[in-house]
Image: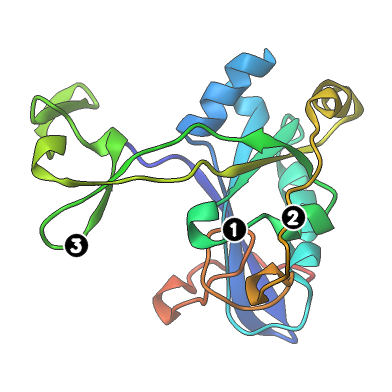
Amino acid sequence: MPDPKRVKVGVWEDGVFVGVVIFSRGVSATKISKTMGISSVEIAELSRVALSTHRTPTTRMVSIALAMLKAKDSGLRVIVSYADENQGHLGIIYQGGNWIYTGRSARVALFRDASGRMIHDRACSASGVKRQFGLLKRAPKPENLTRIEQLPKWRYFMPLDPEMRAKILPLAKPYPKRERSIGIDAAGTTSRGRCDATRSLQPEQATTREPSPA
C-alpha cells in the first residue's frame, strides 16, 4: 500500500523540541468522505501525536496544530481521528477538545508473522500477491499468519466550518467513559499510545522543523 500524504506539525516548549502532531489522508478518510458527500481533499485524519515529556496540555497542542493545518489548507472541512480501545484508550484528549464522538469504527484484522511483526489485513493477500502502483508484488498470505482479533476503535470528528458541524452533530453520541480513570486518560501526560495518549518520542523521530506556538 502506498504511504498517504502527511503533514507534520512540530511542537516546541521554551525552544526545545518535544514532539510532533501528524495529519494524513489515508484509506479511512477517503471512505468517510464518500459517505459524507464531500471530496477526499476536504477531510484529513489526525493519525499520530508523539510527544516526549511536556508541560502544555495535549489538547492545547492539538488545537494549535489544527489551527495551523486549517491556515495552510483552507479547503479542509473536517478532521477524523480514532482512539484505539485495543491499547486501552477512550479518546480523552478529543473529549477535552470538544470533538464529536460518533460511535465505533468497523473491526479491522491484524496478523502476526513468525518473527512477531504485526501486519494489517490490507497488506495481506490470499493469492500471495498484491498490485501496487500497477505492479504485482509478493504479499503474505493470511493462512500463514496468526490472526489477532481487534476491538473496533472510537471515532471522533472535528468539523472546521459551521455547515460541516451541522452535518455531523446529528450523528453525535455520548462520550464513552470508564468506571474509573487510569493514567493514560489524563490529557497532556506522556504514555504509550496512538493519538489520545501521547507516545514517547524517539530521537530519530525528531525531524520536523515547523515551529508551533504551543
Q: CA distance from mark 2 to mark 3?
A: 32 Å
- Disc 1 marks a residue whose amino acid type is Cys
Q: Amino acid at mark 3?
A: Gly
- How many C-alpha atoms fall within 10 Å of the one at disc 3: few (<14), some, or many (≥20)? few
Q: Is residue 202 left or right of residue 187?
A: left
Give the residue number, with chain letter if any, for mark 1: 195
Q: For this view, does 211 lie left or right of residue 22?
A: right
Badge 3 is on which residue? Answer: 116
The residue shown at (53%, 25%) is 30
Q: CA distance from mark 1 to mark 2?
A: 17 Å
**Quadrant where the N terminus is found in the figure:** top left
Q: Looking at the rendered structure, which numbered label has been put on residue 177?
A: 2
| Comes first in the chain, label 3 or label 1 | 3
**Element at label 1:** loop
Give the colour scheme shown.
Answer: rainbow
**Mark 1–mark 2 contact, CB under 8 Å?**
no
Q: Are marks 2 and 3 in contact (CB under 8 Å)?
A: no
Give the vertical position of 170 relative to 66 (above or below): above
Horizontal arrangement in the rendering, residue 86 relative to residue 82 (left or right): left
Q: Earlier in the sequence, mark 2 or mark 3?
A: 3
Mark 1 or 2, closer to the camera: 2
Q: Amino acid at mark 2?
A: Lys
Displayed quadrant of residue 8: bottom right
Residue at x 45%, y 35% (from the top left corner) = 107
Q: Is residue 125 above or below residue 167?
A: below
